Amino acid sequence: MSYQTEVISSQPQMTVTSYKITTGSSTWNTDVCDCFDDCGICLCGTFLPCCLGCKVAQDHGESCCVPFLPGGLVALRTSIRNQYGISGSICDDWIVMVCCLHCGLCQLGREQKTRG
């Protein structure tokens, strides 16, 4: 009877992905109530908010369904704010998107248009 011994010469390695963490040092280019700074976005946000929500989500690289999920617009606003390093909090995002939905959505559209 013969036995073979297997020698392990290297251990499995784990890869760690790094994420860009931005500090909130920037501000929004326009205020929540500056809807008339871009009349096209203002009209779309007023009369077709579902379409504007889908466009903002898709331009951010998310699914068009995100605005229709519970809390989806708050998450979208928080993600956009973090991407551009805009100072604020999730609580601020929630207040804007719950109390001033159309204006907040228009602000997101203007921000994406301004920053490209």
Image: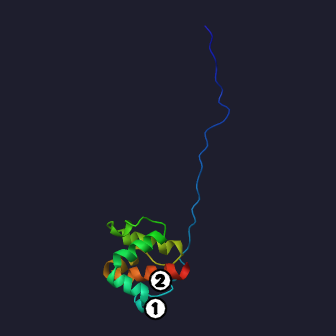
Instruction: Check residue 22 in the rendering and tell me which mark sits there, or answer none.
Output: none
Label 2 residue SS: helix
In the rendered image, residue 63, in percent from the top left (x then y), is placed at: 42, 64
The residue that appears at 43% across and 83% down in the rendered structure is: 107
Point out the tag, 2 or 1, that comes first from the N-terminus.
1
In the rendered image, residue 74, in percent from the top left (x then y), is placed at: 38, 72
In the rendered image, residue 72, in percent from the top left (x then y), is placed at: 37, 68
The residue that appears at 46% across and 91% down in the rendered structure is: 37
Please name whichever residue, 74 or 52, is drawn nearer the observer in this view of the structure.
Answer: 52
Please name whichever residue, 79 or 11, is drawn nearer the observer in this view of the structure.
Answer: 79
The residue that appears at 52% across and 72% down in the rendered structure is: 83
Q: Mark yes or no: residue 26 visible.
A: no
Q: What amino acid is labelled 2 in the image?
A: Arg
Q: Are marks 2 and 1 in contact (CB under 8 Å)?
A: yes
The residue that appears at 39% across and 87% down in the rendered structure is: 42
Distance (Cα) linking label 2 and label 1: 8 Å
Return the residue at label 1. Answer: 37
In the rendered image, residue 105, in percent from the top left (x then y), is placed at: 39, 79
Query: Counting other residues with Cα less than 10 Å from the Cα at mark 2, is it few (<14), some (14-19), or many (20 or more)?
Result: many
Please name whichever residue, 77 or 18, is drawn nearer the observer in this view of the structure.
Answer: 77
Q: Mark yes or no: residue 114 visible.
A: yes
Q: Residue furthest toward the top?
A: 1
Quadrant of the drawing holding the C terminus:
bottom right
- In terms of image quadrants, where is residue 5? top right
Q: What amino acid is labelled 1 in the image?
A: Asp
Quadrant of the drawing holding the N terminus:
top right
Return the residue at label 2. Answer: 110
- Indicate the colouring scheme: rainbow
Query: Counting other residues with Cα less than 10 Å from the Cα at mark 1, is it few (<14), some (14-19), or many (20 or more)?
Result: some
Label 1 residue SS: helix
